Amino acid sequence: MTKVAIFGVGLIGGSLALCLKGKPGLRVAGHSNNPASVDKYLKRGVVDEATTSMEEAARDADFIFLCVPVGCLEDYLQKLNGMRLKPGCIISDVGSTKRTVMDAAKSLHWENVHFIGGHPMAGKEQSGVEAATSHLFENAFYVLTPDESTPALEVERLEQLLAHTRAHIVKMAPAQHDDIVGAVSHLPHVIAVALVNQVADYNEENDLYERLAAGGFRDITRIASSDPIIWRDILLNNRSVVLRLLEDWKERMDGFIDMLNKEDGAGIESEFMKAGSFRNALPERRKGVIHSTFDVYVDVPDHPGVVGEIAGQLGSRQINLSNIQIMESRLDVPGVMRLSFREEEQLDRAVEVLKELGYSLHF
Ligand SMILES: NC(=O)c1ccc[n+]([C@@H]2O[C@H](COP(=O)([O-])OP(=O)(O)OC[C@H]3O[C@@H](n4cnc5c(N)ncnc54)[C@H](O)[C@@H]3O)[C@@H](O)[C@H]2O)c1
Ligand SMILES: O=C(O)C(=O)C[C@]1(C(=O)O)C=C[C@@H](O)C=C1
């Protein structure tokens, strides 16, 4: 039996555990410092065994995944470094920044144990094991940042195990990871939080702000509800990159201020045109960029029966919907409904049916 130990069975650790548990030849052990969490992991059936003892979780493990906040990783590495681990053990992490953890791992001497940094580019704004799902990583990119000194065979062993997540593995240097993910994930979280707090402050004077906030506000701010501790650690660990990106952001905002002061309509148009053509051409757009579902947007007359009608039409043809979301729900205007499917083939069949029924679709 291959033993996989997961330290921190929250959203990401729990999702990883669900991908691996029950697979032939695999046994999954969970660790938490908190006895109540250990009980919860067992009660929810996310792991085969769970303990509050780091030694017990790590003992005989072939793979160890650190799924705790980024700020805890160095401490966990130091503790594991002081333990007798199984020869050949691979330690990995799922942290959203890679440079600091790779540096910490490199600064320690490991005896026949390999550290390979990892980061699945999938997640959500919810946290905790309650939010974990077995399909979170499906179709997402999963970054590995192996050190040059790590034998290729060990990286392959990790890749083979991660194949259970159905994610696409991509390898890169830690600094490159932090630069890119800083721009596509860390900066957007800062912007979302600043924007929500700006509106929250205005709303204290006049609650019409919250009442009028609609699709635009919701779409750009979902991630502002993300976990404060997780994000504190991410931003502090990618501080220099995020600072550089924020300086650039300030200049871009100054550009908008300038265009508005000069009433430069052509300049504004050209910013929207550039953004639209980049975003519309994103290759994975149909999968929601990094989401594990395959989505289609349907224009629907906004009447109560339409959800049932569409679900019924798809259900009668054995097309499995994984989620339905009404994007606009104002009276007297057409609404937009997002239908999500776990498999592309199901989406393709749904598209065919909905087109036949005369619905207008967008991807
Ligand atoms: N949330 C995302 O979308 C996302 C996506 C990819 C990677 N990550 C990374 O995954 C890791 C886990 O994030 P998550 O979203 O699963 O968070 P989470 O809050 O759902 O889970 C964190 C886990 O770590 C434990 N934990 C929290 N603080 C701890 C501490 N001080 N000491 C020991 N254990 C502690 C919690 O009990 C929990 O089991 C983070 O490093 C994060 O950067 C998050
Ligand atoms: O979808 C979300 O809610 C996420 O925040 C996921 C997201 C991202 O920014 O894309 C967040 C942090 C990760 O490290 C990877 C993915």
Image (spheres, rainbow, N blue to C red):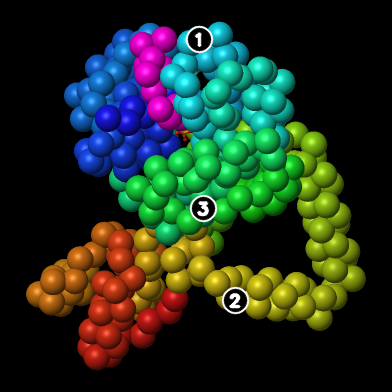
Q: Residues within 10 Å of mark 2 (few under 14, many from 20)?
A: few
Q: Quadrant of residue 303?
A: bottom left
Magenta segment boundaries in residue numbering: 55-67
- Earlier-in-chain disc, 2 versus 1: 1
Question: How far across and how far down the image is residue 232, in percent?
Answer: 62, 29
Q: Which mark is residue 83?
A: 1
Which quarter of the figure is the N terminus placed in? top left
Residue marked by disc 2 = 281
Q: Quick check: can you spot residue 196?
A: no
Label 3, label 1: how far apart the Cα atoms are: 29 Å
The one of 352 and 275 positioned closer to us in this rendering:
352
Q: Which residue lies at the image location 33% right of the left edge and 27% below the top edge?
A: 3
Vertical position of residue 206 compared to residue 273: above or below: above
Question: How far across and how far down the image is residue 340, in percent?
Answer: 32, 64
Q: Which residue lies at the image location 21% right of the left edge and 30% below the top edge?
A: 45
Residue marked by disc 3 = 169
Q: Which residue lies at the image location 42% right of the left edge and 37% below the top edge?
A: 12
**Secondary structure at numbered mark 2:** loop
Label 2, label 1: how far apart the Cα atoms are: 49 Å
